[in-house]
Amino acid sequence: MMLRVSEWVGVWSFHQRALLTTSNSKSKWSSSMIDFNQNRKVVVCGLRSSFKTRRRSRVLSKEGIQVIHALKLAKSPNELHQVVNTKLSRLLIPDVLNLLEELNRQNELHLSLTVFKYIREELELGYARLVQVYADMIEVLGRNKMREMAEELFGEVVPDTRMCSEMIGVYLKLGMTEKAMHIYGSMKEWGCAPDKFTFTILITSLQKTGQQELAEILKQDVNRWVGLVVELGSSQSQIEIVDQS
């Protein structure tokens, strides 16, 4: 069983909860004790959250941490293959997915690709989980300017909205606005409705590169697609998409 920190509360608040559940409690607290306890903290722990939400809490198990260390210590392709077969393959699916996210966070691209290959070839994931893994990999590939590999992954599965948005982000990082707009234009055909994230990265990038006319067209699309409006942020190149209903 894996525990995680789920909440920090003051000791006085923590005791107060306990007292509220005891109707006949005769405990009395002095003002000095209350003042003292208000500045102290206790940790309330809960079970590790499952891999169900789009953005995970990245709670690595002890075994997952050991596998990451083993992957980093591998000095050759053969050693890396052995770690995958003897250690990575023993992890539960949620641990493998959290491990991949941690490697992506550390920008360990080579190791991320190794774990991704294992996930793609050996694990049976549902569509929702699979496309999120693909979207994560496209994001990290774009971060490392590996456009061609990102395009290859993008073409392997039917994309969802986030996967399209991450591919748009890859193109925008490389100044390839035309390709980014092509993905945006194809989203309806693929059954993917642009969301707030999609419009934010597109409009912000277009404004930074001086393509105001195209940015204005997208601002009109924002209200049509997501029912929100675009406002300027602290600078002309920053935008905020807000609900003014």
Image (cartoon, rainbow, N blue to C red):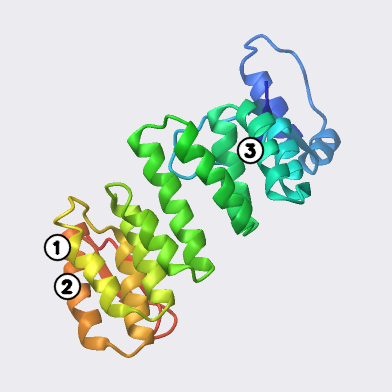
Q: Which mark is residue 224?
A: 1
Q: Which mark is residue 9?
A: none
Q: Nearer the viewer, mark 1 or mark 3?
A: 3
Secondary structure beneath dot 1 equals helix
Dot 2 and dot 3 residues touching (CB under 8 Å): no
Secondary structure beneath dot 2 equals helix
Q: Is residue 41 left or right of residue 101?
A: right
Where residue 218 sits, quadrant-wise, is bottom left
On the question of residue 182 being in view, the answer is yes
Residue drawn at point x = 25 percent, y = 65 percent: 183
Q: Which corner quadrant holds the N terminus? A: top right
Disc 2 from disc 3: Cα separation: 40 Å
Q: Is residue 116 above or below residue 25?
A: below
Mark 1: amino acid: Arg
In the picture as drawn, the residue positioned furthest to the top comes out as: 24
Mark 3: amino acid: Val
Disc 1 from disc 3: Cα separation: 38 Å
In-front residue for pair 25/197: 197
Residue drawn at point x = 43 percent, y = 68 percent: 147
Q: Is residue 145 above or below residue 48?
A: below
Q: Position of residue 151 (x, y in %)?
A: 36, 62
Residue on which the image places disc 2:
220
Q: Which corner quadrant holds the C terminus? A: bottom left
Residue drawn at point x = 25 percent, y = 59 percent: 194
Q: Position of residue 128 (x, y in %)?
A: 35, 38
In the picture as drawn, the residue positioned furthest to the front comes out as: 78
Mark 2: amino acid: Gln
Where residue 80 sits, quadrant-wise, is top right
Answer with mark 2 or mark 3, whichever residue precedes in sequence: 3
Dot 2 and dot 1 residues touching (CB under 8 Å): yes
